Amino acid sequence: MTTPIIPTEMTFFARFESDILSGKKTITIRDEAERHYVPGTTVDVSTYEDGRWFCRLEILSVEPIAFSDLNDFHAQQENMTLTELKAVINDIYPGIEKLYVVNYTLVK
Ligand SMILES: CC(=O)Nc1ccn([C@H]2C[C@H](O)[C@@H](CO)O2)c(=O)n1
């Protein structure tokens, strides 16, 4: 039996940093490769572009979601409209239907 590796790091595109730090963005939607975050653990967060650390987040939950089931509540939690959110996700994960909502809170 293999021991699961608990992720301790997460990256975000730098353009989302201010929304995360202000508490306006409280979820991120990731693909299969990033579904292994564990509720109750904390992760160090840095920018995807240059690896600059900017905060720690506590993972609250990780729930599967189909792209076609994304709704206005998800968009609100991302501080976007649903149209914007779907466009962002389509850009990052083109054609991927099976996704995961990672809910987090800023560690102060
Ligand atoms: C490497 C990678 O995939 N990085 C990501 C993925 C997603 N995000 C943001 C963009 C949206 O706000 C949500 C939904 O995917 O999460 C990101 O910043 N970096």
Image (spheres, helix red, strand yellow):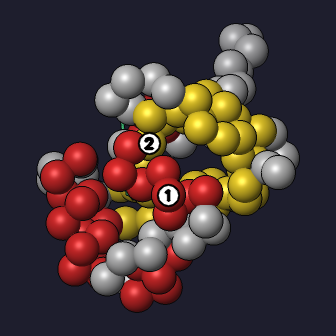
Amino acid on which disc 2 is placed: Phe
Residue 35 sits above or below residue 46 on the image: below
Assign the N terminus to one quadrant of the image.
top right
Q: Residue furthest bottom?
A: 72
Residue 108 sits above or below residue 84 on the image: above
Asked which secondary structure carries label 1, the reply is: helix
Any mark on residue 18, and which? 1
Residue 6 located left or right of residue 79: right
Residue 63 image position (x, y, % from top left): 59, 60
Residue 39 image position (x, y, % from top left): 77, 48
Alpha carbons under labels 1 and 2: distance apart: 11 Å
Residue 37 image position (x, y, % from top left): 64, 39
> Viewer-proximal residue, 20 or 42?
20
Dot in front, 1 or 2: 1
Amino acid on which disc 1 is placed: Ser
For disc 2, does the CB lie below 8 Å from ligand 1? yes
Any mark on residue 12, and which? 2
Q: Quadrant of residue 22?
A: bottom right
Residue 102 located left or right of residue 90: right
For disc 1, does the CB lie below 8 Å from ligand 1? no
Q: Which residue is pictured at 70% across the width and 12% down the height?
A: 2
Residue 39 sits above or below residue 26 on the image: above
- Residue 39 seen in render: no
Asked which secondary structure carries label 2, the reply is: strand
Q: Which residue is pictured at 72% across the width and 59% down the height?
A: 105
Instruction: Work out whether mark 1 precedes mark 2 in sequence or the reverse, and give the earlier one.
Output: 2
Residue 20 located left or right of residue 82: right
